[in-house]
Image: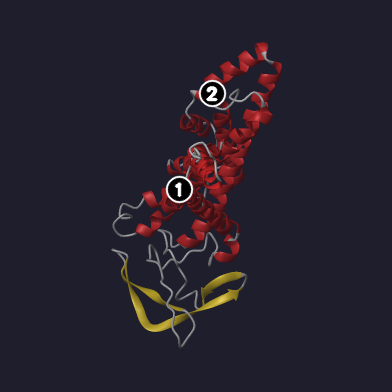
């Protein structure tokens, strides 16, 4: 009696069929998308940008405590002096050496290593100062052509430049959202009128508008007037480019947040540009733009006094940090979407 076993489906045969089915179904389960390493890299870039911006924002807020000197303190015997470098020793607390002027014409200095000057911590509401400010002040970024501490002015300048950029960006977005929302809600003739007004303002260069307004104003303006003037110009010109771009405000939340973050670095550069051409804040108010304007009057700044260009480095770092945070966040959200 012969038995045909070719049609039998035993346990092993059934298990083999199930395994084959799983093997055939496996490829569709693989989905395309960024790997964990690529995503981690983007997150790392965004984190770096956030840290850079946070450090500068914290430095601006804490400027009265971190800055060793006031914004208008001058050291007449130390014009364009190099930075003082703190030294650390196991036998004594951190100290510095004072600079000695050896050539007034060339403004050349030498270090006096005869007697170290200890640093003094948490004294007079300041984080750190020299114990002998009259003879050897702590000048971490050197001094400018007027003998003022560049590091202290850089921190106080961050307060002015960053606050001006933030106020201008918020004002621009408020004006743009209000006009765009009104045009989208009412429509008709009002929508058309706002569109034409937006087109007109968009073609006006902010620099020439500022120059025209500055020409009809008094030669010397109070710092509050300059702040309000620059903030108004930035807000007006920038908001016009965004009027009617999004008519439905609830659906434009992500766009508004991104535009707000992108306007801040643009306004930082704009303030520096206007201050560079003489439309900035008067003395003794410090901003990054006015500091660059003061440095531009010295033809030896690149060769002999590079520390005077520290505001340019600060602007670069803040703009870089904002761009890293914004662009990386946008790319990450698009990937997830």
Residue 331 point in image, percent of width and height: 50, 40
Q: Nearer the viewer, mark 1 or mark 2?
A: 1
Dot 2: element: helix
**Residue 122 badge:** none
Local packing at callout 2 (Cα closer than 10 Å; few below 14, some 14-19, many 20+) is some
**Number of callouts:** 2
Whether residue 155 is visible, yes or no, is yes
Q: Residue furthest right?
A: 186
Please determine whether, in this image, residue 55 is positioned above or below residue 14: below
Q: Nearer the viewer, residue 314 or 250?
A: 250
- Return the residue nearer the eye: 45 or 147: 45
What is the x, y in percent for residue 54? 56, 55
Residue that badge 1 annotates: 38
Residue at image coords 53%, 67% = 68
Q: Residues within 10 Å of mark 1 (few under 14, many from 20)?
A: few
**Does residue 267 show up?**
no
In this view, 207 is above or below 185: below
């Amino acid at each position: 009696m012969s038995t045909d076993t070719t049609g039998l489906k035993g346990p092993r045969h059934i298990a083999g069929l199930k395994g084959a089915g799983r093997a055939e179904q496996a490829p569709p389960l693989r989905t395309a998308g960024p790997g964990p390493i690529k995503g981690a890299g983007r997150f790392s870039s965004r984190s770096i940008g956030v840290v850079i911006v946070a450090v500068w924002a914290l430095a601006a807020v804490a400027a009265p405590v971190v800055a060793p000197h006031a914004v208008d303190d001058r050291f007449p015997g130390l014009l364009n002096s190099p930075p003082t470098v703190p030294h650390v020793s196991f036998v004594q607390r951190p100290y510095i050496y004072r600079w000695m002027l050896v050539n007034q014409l060339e403004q050349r200095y030498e270090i006096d290593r005869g007697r170290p000057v200890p640093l003094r911590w948490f004294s007079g509401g300041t984080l750190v100062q020299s114990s002998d400010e009259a003879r050897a002040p702590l000048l971490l970024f050197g001094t400018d052509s007027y003998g003022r501490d560049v590091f202290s002015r850089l921190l106080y300048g961050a307060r002015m430049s960053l606050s001006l950029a933030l106020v201008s960006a918020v004002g621009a977005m408020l004006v743009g959202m209000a006009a765009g929302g009104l045009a989208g809600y009412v429509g008709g003739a009002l929508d058309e009128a706002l569109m034409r007004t937006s087109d007109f303002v968009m073609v006006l260069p902010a620099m020439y508008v500022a120059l025209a307004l500055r020409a009809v104003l008094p030669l010397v303006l109070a710092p509050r007037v300059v702040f309000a003037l620059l903030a108004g110009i930035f807000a007006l010109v920038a908001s016009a480019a965004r009027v009617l771009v999004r008519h439905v405000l609830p659906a434009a939340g992500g766009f508004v947040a991104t535009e707000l973050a992108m306007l801040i670095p643009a306004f930082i550069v704009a303030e520096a540009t206007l201050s560079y051409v003489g439309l900035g804040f008067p003395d003794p108010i410090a901003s990054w733009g006015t500091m660059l304007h003061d440095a531009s009057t010295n033809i030896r700044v690149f060769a002999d006094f590079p520390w005077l260009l520290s505001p340019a480095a600060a602007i670069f770092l803040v703009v870089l940090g904002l761009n890293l945070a914004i662009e990386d966040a946008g790319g990450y959200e698009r990937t997830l979407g």
